[in-house]
Image: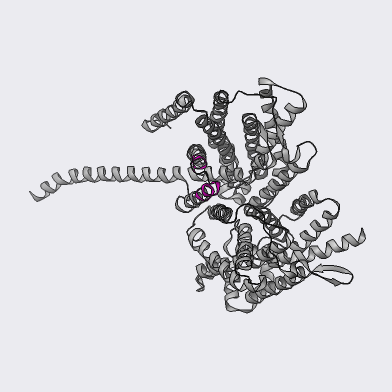
Amino acid sequence: MGRLIYEAIIDGILIGGVYALMAVGLTLIFGVLDIINIAQGILVILGAYLSYVLSVHLHIDLFVGLLITVPAMFVIGITIYWAFIRPLRGHERTGMALLASYAVAIVIEGILYWIFTPNYVQLRAPYVTASVRVFGFYLPYIYLYGFALALALVGLIYLMLYRTKFGRSVRATMQDQVAARLIGIDVNRVAGLTFGIGVAVTAVGGMMYGATSGGFNPNSGYDLISRLLAIVILGGLGSIAGALVASVFMLTLESVVNVWSPEWAIVVFYAALALVLIFRPAGLLGRQAVREQ
Amino acid sequence: MTGPGAAWRGGGILALLAALALFPLVFTNPLVTTIGVDTMIFVVAASAWNIFSGYSGYISLGHAVFFGTGAYTVGIAARDWNLTGTTVFWLLPLAAAVAAVIAVPFGLLALRVRRHTFVVVTIAIFFIFQLMAYNLPFTGGTTGVSAPFLAWQPGTSNDPFYYLAMAIAVATVGLSWLIRGSRFGLQLRAIRDDEGRTRGLGVHTMRVKLAAFVISAFITGLIGGLWFYFITQVLPPSGFDPAFNVSVALMAFFGGLGTVAGPVLGALILEPAAQYLTLEFPNAFLSQIILGALFAAVVVLLPRGVIPTVGEKVTSWRARRSDHLAARVAAAAARPSAERSSS
């Protein structure tokens, strides 16, 4: 039993790293645009299907394929921003953007069903099934590679935010849009690029999800978005460090409960969110934490 | 409000009620009357959603919790108490009461957080309920709860459901109108505009929000119970349906968020449209794509809904017409004076 729990903890941490990457995209979009991108879940699935097409039909390796799918998702993200998010104005903008992104999710889901049918598919590669022995635990290579890649990308986003001029304008926009506009920042451009980056990371998340989840179909987007939302709320909306901590915490918790009861593991996931909100309505690391960094 | 505007409005409401009451007498095709019952159910659900979310500005995407709870409550109660025939309809208030009771802890938890977070918390709680429907011992798991004991005659049974749903719809819209004009409704709308200031003025905002949430849940649970008797089966994904969450919000947004007539108009247009698309396009995915695109177009092109937009157009047309009249009167008044001054 003890051994199973240790294994569950390690699995949870590794998968948590991948969820962190998807959640960082979501929380970044929230921080800059003040909107919740409900389409993030189905975009992850779209990324997974793109990887699937590249690997099955063109025989491109999953990780190499990311060189194509990441820019593709970036472009899709910017297109969604220009077509559906940017035109929204006024008092109810947050609510409208939520519904607009929900509408986008419904359309993408329908298109994916049409092309790929509701049959479950899975991404396959030699390193998906092969494992390596580390300290007596067998870990599939894909978990290790995916974790490393996710950490590298989250690190890259951090560097971009805190070491570049663009990052400074992103953070300025997060703090105060009007003031950012006054000092000459093109807020629309910043918002569009942020949306693109937030969506681009779903290509990596989707590839990992497609390889490790044991099968996905267009409906999997709902499961993903509800988990991602729970993670970003738990971490504190707009906080990147919070998203990291919350992903690892939630996925580890789920993985450990899963040892006893697979049916209730996901309920524990949402119950943890409810409990945290009773004591800390702003999440573990509220938005203030980002500003102070 | 008095004058010709009120008369027009009263006449319009009477005409709409008469048209709705005559609908099943004119269209007897069960396929059509089924759409009629579904539409009435959504008139109630969208109006109930609007009483909380439209007036307070807290967008709930978890109202399917109450709808599904209502459906499961009457299903389980009728099953376990061996009720048959029309006696089961006496269980509808129970469905509403259970949904209202669930709304209290739900609201106390979810209404603590900020507006954006609230949306997400409602989604999370919604998924907890769907998972409970799958996993609890008395909900029947993936096979759900069905009601063979009801034994309606298919094709003949739509009309009673239609009129019952319509009666609930009229009562709900009436309640919505009463609330909107009341002190309670004013407090809700003040919360929507500026919650901090409303609290500063001495309104117990939490109490007001929770009361609206519970009222909204009560009605949604009631209509969920009726829906169960209509389709005689509830499954976890049909009772706790994510599409329901979005549909009611979309209907209210389409017609006009926070107006009394908006959700009614939204439901009367969008539900038949959705059902028609499903019938017209056997490819379910194509109808889903069209619905999603329609939904996106509504949000981007009609962001404030049909009723506020049309209302503004009418107001500006009236203003222009009265400007025009005023200009003619002024011109007529100016002419003789000009003649006088020249002479």
Is residue B189 at all visible to an observer of this figure?
Answer: no
Q: Is residue B158 left or right of residue B101?
A: left
Is residue A242 depicted above or below B97 in this figure? Answer: below
Q: Can you say which quadrant of the picture contains the N terminus of chain B?
A: top left
Is residue A272 depicted above or below A126 in this figure? Answer: above
Q: How many marks?
A: 0
Quadrant position of residue A41? bottom right
Is residue B8 at all visible to an observer of this figure?
Answer: yes
Q: Is residue B20 left or right of residue A268?
A: left
Foreground pick, A276 / B65: B65
Q: Position of residue A254 (x, y in %)?
A: 79, 56
Is residue B250 depicted above or below A145 in this figure? Answer: above
Q: Position of residue B285 (x, y in %)?
A: 55, 49
Confirm whether the magenta stretch covers residue B288. yes
**How are the residues colored?**
one colour
Q: Residue furthest right?
A: A2
Taking the spot 48% from the left edge, 60% from the top edge, the residue there is: A83
Q: Residue furthest left?
A: B343
Confirm whether the magenta stretch covers residue B302. no
Q: Determine the main secondary structure of the stretch shown in magenta.
A: helix
Foreground pick, B329 / A213: A213
Q: Position of residue A257 (x, y in %)?
A: 83, 54
Q: Position of residue A52 (x, y in %)?
A: 63, 64
Is residue B214 depicted above or below A251 in this figure? Answer: above
Magenta region, residue range = B276-290
Q: Is residue B65 left or right of residue B140?
A: left
Quadrant position of residue A4? bottom right
